[in-house]
Amino acid sequence: MRQTLLIFAIAIVLLSACAAPAPAVDLTINTGGCMPERITLPPQHPPALTIHNTAREAMVVSIPTMDRWIELAPGASAVLELPRYIMGTFDLFCLSASDHRALGGDNPFLCMLEPAELAPVARSAGWLIIEPHDRIREVLER
């Protein structure tokens, strides 16, 4: 009996070691908005945010000064690609997809919503900080 339990325990450990690691989430959206409200991307972090929506409704993450936004269905995860060479501090808003649509944010003929339009309806507002990096060197070395 103890040998069977020992073999079973070893099998579980070995199987869990083979499981693919879950991707790291940079930002989680819930009904109240984004957590954390301040995200810092170190120089070695790829120019992208991995986002997971735990809310029971579709939610949007918007970075208006980058002209970037993404809508996530309830329970969905996605990656928001960022401009490769950009650095600095940027406003970040999290709001419901229905509020985003009501503002006209999903209109392909509208360039982008402004922070002043997003702030009143956002569930949360925060910052994305992209620390200085040397990715621009890729262009200079060509």
Image (cartoon, rainbow, N blue to C red):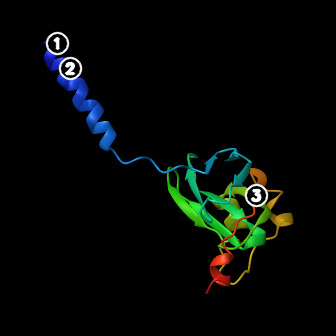
* Label 1 sits on residue: 2
**What's under tag 1, amino acid-wise?**
Arg
Which residue is outermost to the front? 141
In the rendered image, residue 82, in percent from the top left (x then y), is placed at 64, 69
Figure check: 142 above or below 103: below
Figure check: 39 above or below 2: below
Could you say which quadrant of the image residue 48 lies in?
bottom right
Tell me the element at label 3.
strand
In the rendered image, residue 16, in percent from the top left (x then y), is placed at 32, 37
Q: Are marks 1 and 2 in contact (CB under 8 Å)?
A: yes
Task: Give whichever of 61, 135 is nearer the camera.
Answer: 135
Crowdedness near tag 3: few (<14), some (14–19) or many (≥20) residues, C-alpha within 10 Å: some
* Label 2 sits on residue: 6
Crowdedness near tag 1: few (<14), some (14–19) or many (≥20) residues, C-alpha within 10 Å: few
Per the model, the C-alpha gap separating discs 3 and 2 is 49 Å
Could you say which quadrant of the image residue 68 lies in?
bottom right
Residue drawn at x 50%, y 49% as measured from the top left: 75
**What's under tag 2, amino acid-wise?**
Leu
In the rendered image, residue 9, in percent from the top left (x then y), is placed at 25, 24
Tell me the element at label 2.
helix
Residue drawn at x 76%, y 69% as measured from the top left: 64
Q: Could you tell me how many numbered marks the image carries?
A: 3
Residue drawn at x 78%, y 56% as measured from the top left: 121
Tell me the element at label 1.
helix
Q: Do the residues labelled 3 and 2 touch (CB within 8 Å)?
A: no
* Label 3 sits on residue: 129
Figure check: 138 above or below 6: below
**What's under tag 3, amino acid-wise?**
Ile
Per the model, the C-alpha gap separating discs 3 and 1 is 54 Å
